[in-house]
Image: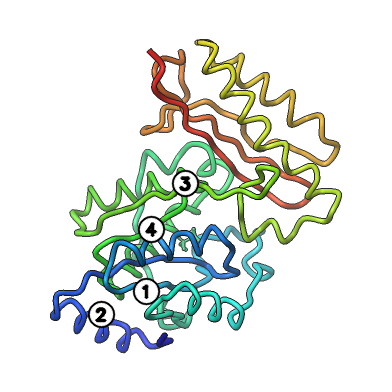
Amino acid sequence: METFRSLAQMKEWSRAQITRGETIGFVPTMGYLHEGHLGLMRRARSENSRVIASIFVNPTQFGRNEDFGSYPRDPESDSLKCRQAEVDVLFMPETQDVYNHEFQTYVDVERVSKPLCGKSRPGHFRGVATVVLKLFNMVYPSSAYFGAKDYQQLQVIRSMVKDLNLDVRIVSCPTLREDDGLAMSSRNSYLAPAERAQAVCLFQALQISGELFRNGEKEPMKYIEAMSGRIIREPDADPDYISLVHPETLEDLNVVDESCLAVLAVRIGKTRLIDNMLFEGRA
Ligand code: PAF
């Protein structure tokens, strides 16, 4: 595995691969890799002749009072994990190379960035879309792989790719979960043992929604009340949002018909966790 920090080196390597007719699968990450990331890398490995993973903790997607400074970092262990996942190139650009000091150009995916996490984290998706486009312009991927846990992020990236006519196939990979159902996330490392035990409430709330969906429930408020009821049983859980939305537009539903996305963000102590489940196929 090669490791590049230089943008020029990364571009040169990718251009040479494309000239030879190779396909490039790309897994962008912010590091502190877990099994969820490694699953994306394995999927990329199985579908492409070359695999690039990036590690870049992107400052523009963090709000002023968020955890940019304390975001967990472990580049040595990450590098080993990428090697084991048979990644060809690990790309770890420097912040000052990604954002020059006169930087002033951002990508704003308007509608789908607004609800849910967009409300509580203003500017977050502008930062995500901007860095993902920048990384695409350094890596030249044929396909890029993202986890479905960050469902809204996926929708933002899909819209950007469509609206800006980018030639990148976006691949959504299922959320990987711990044994008790907690969605894997680098931020789970912030949880103290007592908080970790409570964090399973997100998954269990989503499962309750699944049951309502399968039983034919049409009233969104019934889902929201049932999910809230499960969340607030935990002493350290503080919901940011608990919603039932259209899987594409992410707008609130008035009635649940053939499909819906149950989605929630909950603070467990100081750690903000997100999760979602897509329900579809009801007559
Ligand atoms: O999902 C993430 O880890 C980040 O939001 C991403 C896509 C790597 C952009 O910084």
Residue positioned 54% across, 75% down in the render: 81
Give the CA distance from mark 4 to mark 3: 11 Å
Marks 4/1 in contact by CB < 8 Å: the verdict is: no
Q: Is residue 24 left or right of residue 204?
A: left
Residue holding disc 4: 145
Give the mark nearer the N terminus: 4 vs 1. Answer: 1
Residue holding disc 2: 14
Residue holding disc 3: 174
Quarter of the picture containing the C terminus is: top left
Marks 3/1 in contact by CB < 8 Å: the verdict is: no
Q: Amino acid at mark 2?
A: Ser
Vertical relation: 88 (above or below) 59 = below
Q: Is residue 154 left or right of residue 237?
A: left
Residue positioned 34% across, 63% down in the render: 46
Marks 2/3 in contact by CB < 8 Å: the verdict is: no
Nearer the observer: mark 4 or 3; the answer is 3
Residue 136: which quarter of the image? Answer: bottom left
Q: Nearer the viewer, residue 39 or 154?
A: 39
